[in-house]
Amino acid sequence: MESLPVPIVQSLASGAAGVPVRYIRTDADAVPVVLDPDLEIPTVDFGRLLDPGSSRQESLKLHSACQDWGFFQLMNHNIPHELIERMKVDITEFFKLPLETKKEFSQLPGNLEGYGQLFVFSKDQKLDWGDMMYFHTQPLRRRSKDLWPTHPHTFRDTLDNYSSELYLLGKIF
């Protein structure tokens, strides 16, 4: 099923017409959130996974995190800290760009890559008050680097390097 096109949220936020009904959620729509300050996001130490002396114990932590949480934080993965920080900076800078610049990359519904909203399947569906970026980075044959932002000027290279590092990390598993 293909995602339906919807306006970019930033353009809606700058309008004087108010919040469209599709973005308003009543208390009946709310999903209860349970906050337990004693719960911590599970962490898995990649170095311990590779170490024969601690691999079994760390593998059990990984299994538990996947089964009970569905996600985890990976420590000691050897992806350069500078590259992670550069990716964060580039993404932050992209979202600070003027709407008109970001619209150059708002091609989501047809080819499912770009900037905007995705996973909109009904004209009556409640929508999230936020836009996203979605690009294929792996496998390489799916990449459309021409769709990746050119602002900030380092974005394409940073995303290319970052996704390559993640691919290499994933190959180890």
Image (cartoon, grey):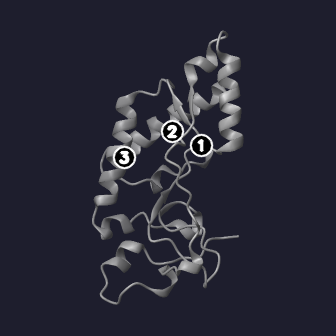
Instruction: Kindly indicate whether the residue at mark 2 contacts the one at mark 3 (C-beta within 8 angstroms).
Output: no
Q: Which mark is residue 155?
A: 3
Residue that lies at the very extreme toward the top in this rendered image: 53
Residue shown at the point (68%, 20%) measured from the top left: 57
The image quarter in which residue 95 lies: bottom left
Mark 3 lies on a secondary structure that is helix
Number of the label disc, if any, that sits on residue 138:
1
Q: Would residue 6 be found to the left or right of residue 140 on screen?
A: left
From the top left corner, tell me how far across and down residue 10 is, in percent: 36, 72
Whole-percent x, y for residue 15 in the image? 31, 84
Camera-side residue of 151 and 92: 92
- 36 lies above or below 51: below
Left or right of 17, for residue 51 = right
**Which amino acid does the dot numbered 2 rest on?**
Ser
Residue linked to disc 2: 163
C-alpha separation, residue under disc 2 versus residue under disc 1: 8 Å
Residue in the picture at 31% in, 65% down: 101
Q: Amino acid at mark 3?
A: Phe
Name the image quarter holding the N terminus: bottom right
C-alpha span from label 3 to label 1: 17 Å
